[in-house]
Image (cartoon, helix red, strand yellow):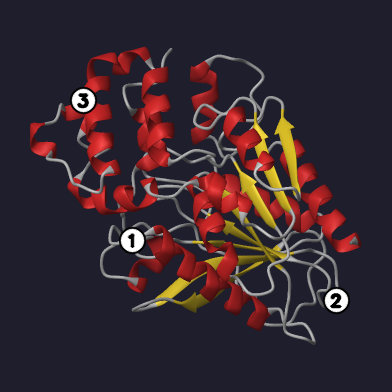
Amino acid sequence: MQPSPVIIARLFALSLGFAMTPPASAQTGSDLDIGESMPIEEELTASGPTGPLRGTLTLPTEHGPLPADVPVFLVVPGSGPTDRDGNSPLGIAAAPYRLLAEALAERGYPSVRIDKRGMFESKGAIPDPNDVRIASYGDDLLAWTAAIRKRLPTQDGTRCVIPIGHSEGGLVALAAMARIPDACGLILIASIGRPLDEVIGEQLRANPANAPFLQEAEAAMATLKRGNRVDTGTMSPPLRPLFGAEVQGFLIDAISYDPIELAARVEVPMLVLQGTRDLQVSVTDARMLADATADATLALLPDVNHVLKTVASEDASANLATYTNAAIPIAPSVVDAVADFVQGIRQD
């Protein structure tokens, strides 16, 4: 079964806000003496423009304070109303970020996963969740870096924070890297290597059901590329959610970034991780990102899809079925690639 018209592009490009509350996290105190078997989670906050940004800190299970050389991962969520667990009311309930955090904690690595400004538990951070730009999401990464270093300090105050940008979050992380103080690494998972309009166009063309709308969609993307808005009132109904008036400001801004130019400026070790079963981002994008800078590692993971689950078949319906199943574990190769990369950083 083919994906429905424009659904793949919508999963990547929409930036609509929904006031939904993610599952509650277990609360702990500030003591880092950690339990026997299960990772410990606690709510963490960072400063937002008009209210707090909220996320979950997942701590590893071993006892004792966190060694100074252990980094903290900061998971940067993908497009649209994606919550701290990696779920979305647009039809994603795979919990890839929560599962990644739990798996990394089992390897001894803490992480912070976040609700985007204006959404979910960070809804008080800005009045309008659609009034955002790539740079404003980058501002939040700086705030989260400061909050992480305050919560898990080292003697010199420079706890290593490594952003893990997933999908659109990779573009956010790339654009913010030059501003993050004392950055020591960057991980891009399923991140685009071309401007967003090119990727959306490719996603639309990949589904034959979109054929009647392609010319109209391409004309709209070209208008946005020039920095101008489009009139959705005259559009075919299936295209209106993708080009909603409320998200056009964000789309115009996001389209203006070239991920390859940003990757070329990264001055820390970078891991580019890409699943070969990804329906939304291609291996070509991953290769482009990895080729942009000398200190990059490319990890192509067989049978891994966009929500970091193992998919043995080429059947698109089987692939999309994993988007709604949090019971499917995260692909072990994802965790292995991240852990191996960070181990290399710690040994340098």
The secondary structure type at the circle numbered 3 is helix
Residue type highlighted by circle 2: Gly
Point out residue 346 in the picture as x, y percentages from the top left corner. Answer: 86, 62
Question: Which mark is in front, 1 or 2?
Answer: 1
Residue 132 shows which numbered tag? 1
**For the residue carrying disc 3, how many other residues have a C-alpha within 10 Å: few (<14), some (14-19), or many (20+)?**
few
Work out whether 68 lies above or below 107. below
Labels 1 and 3: the sequence-earlier one: 1
> How far, Cα to Cα, is label 1 from label 2?
40 Å
**Residue at the disc numbered 2:** 64
Residue 272 shows which numbered tag? none
Image quadrant where one finds the N terminus:
top left
User: In the image shown, does 171 or 86 lie closer to the viewer?
Assistant: 171
The single residue placed furthest to the right in the displayed view is: 347
Could you tell me which residue is drawn at 49 percent across and 31 percent down? 280
Labels 1 and 2: the sequence-earlier one: 2
> How far, Cα to Cα, is label 1 from label 3?
26 Å
User: In the image shown, does 163 or 323 lie closer to the viewer?
Assistant: 163
Could you tell me which residue is drawn at 77 percent across and 61 percent down? 109
Residue type highlighted by circle 3: Glu
Question: Which mark is in front, 1 or 3?
Answer: 3
Point out residue 329 in the picture as x, y percentages from the top left corner. Answer: 67, 38
Residue 146 occupies quadrant: bottom right
Question: Which mark is in front, 2 or 3?
Answer: 3
Tag count? 3
**Residue at the disc numbered 3:** 216
Could you tell me which residue is drawn at 85 percent across and 74 percent down? 67
Labels 2 and 3: the sequence-earlier one: 2
Point out residue 25 in the picture as x, y percentages from the top left corner. Answer: 56, 64
Point out residue 125 in the picture as x, y percentages from the top left corner. Answer: 36, 72
Residue type highlighted by circle 1: Val
